[in-house]
């Protein structure tokens, strides 16, 4: 079984605080609970705050995330699946998708030092 990361992106930056969303906590609990019931939840994720800083080359530090971007990174979690296609099918049930509030980026997790 392979490990995949779900990266949750809100299409409305004002909803990235999670408490302003169209989604209920129960929707998230049900979706994540369904993945866990299949023994496919690798590690629970975390919500991300709406403030922060970005460190760039030459010691340039800027405030972030940027309000001018169209999507805001809101959180992440890890799942186990046999393939990218299976992980994508799991992501389709995410409350972000169901409420048309954002996207879920599905990425394979690579072992350190493994380029394939």
Image: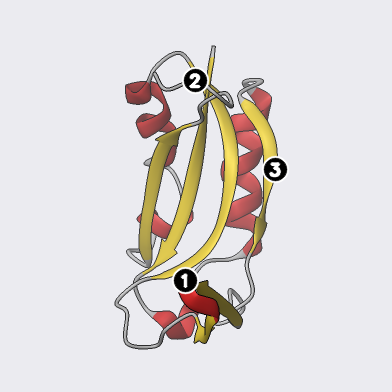
Q: Which residue is rendered at x = 37% and y = 67% of the image?
A: 101
Q: Which residue is rendered at x = 43% and y = 43% of the image?
A: 93
Identify the secondary structure beneath mark 3: strand
Identify the secondary structure beneath mark 2: loop
Mark 2: give few (<14), some (14-19) or many (20+) Cα within 10 Å: few
Disc number placed over residue 114 in the picture, else none = 2
**Residue holding disc 3:** 44
Disc number placed over residue 57 in the picture, else none = 1
Relative side of 82 to 52, left or right: left
Residue 16 in view in this figure = no
Identify the secondary structure beneath mark 1: helix
**Residue 38 vs residue 51, the one in the foreground:** 51
Please provide percent x and percent y for residue 24: 59, 66
* Picture layout, residue 30 above or below residue 61: above
Residue 25 in view in this figure = yes
> Which mark is nearer the camera, 2 or 3?
2
* Picture layout, residue 101 above or below residue 81: below
- How far apart marks 1 and 3 lie (CA) works out to 32 Å
Relative side of 87 to 111, left or right: left
Quadrant the N terminus occupies: top right
- How far apart marks 1 and 2 lie (CA) works out to 26 Å
Please provide percent x and percent y for residue 95: 47, 55
Q: Which residue is rendered at x = 61% and y = 24% of the image?
A: 40
Q: Residue furthest front?
A: 58
Please provide percent x and percent y for residue 60: 50, 82
Please provide percent x and percent y for residue 39: 66, 20
Mark 1: give few (<14), some (14-19) or many (20+) Cα within 10 Å: few
Query: Which is nearer the N-term, disc 2 or disc 3?
Result: 3
């Amino acid at each position: 079984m392979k490990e995949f990361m779900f990266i949750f992106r809100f299409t409305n930056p004002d909803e990235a605080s999670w408490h302003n969303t169209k989604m209920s906590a129960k929707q998230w609990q049900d979706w994540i609970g369904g993945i866990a019931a299949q023994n496919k939840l690798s590690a629970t994720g975390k919500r991300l705050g709406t403030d922060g800083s970005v460190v760039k080359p030459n010691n340039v530090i800027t405030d972030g995330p940027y309000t001018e971007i169209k999507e805001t990174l809101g959180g992440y979690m890890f799942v186990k699946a046999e393939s990218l296609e299976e992980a994508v099918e799991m992501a389709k049930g995410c409350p972000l998708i169901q409420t048309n509030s954002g996207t879920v980026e599905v990425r394979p997790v690579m072992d350190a030092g493994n380029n394939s």
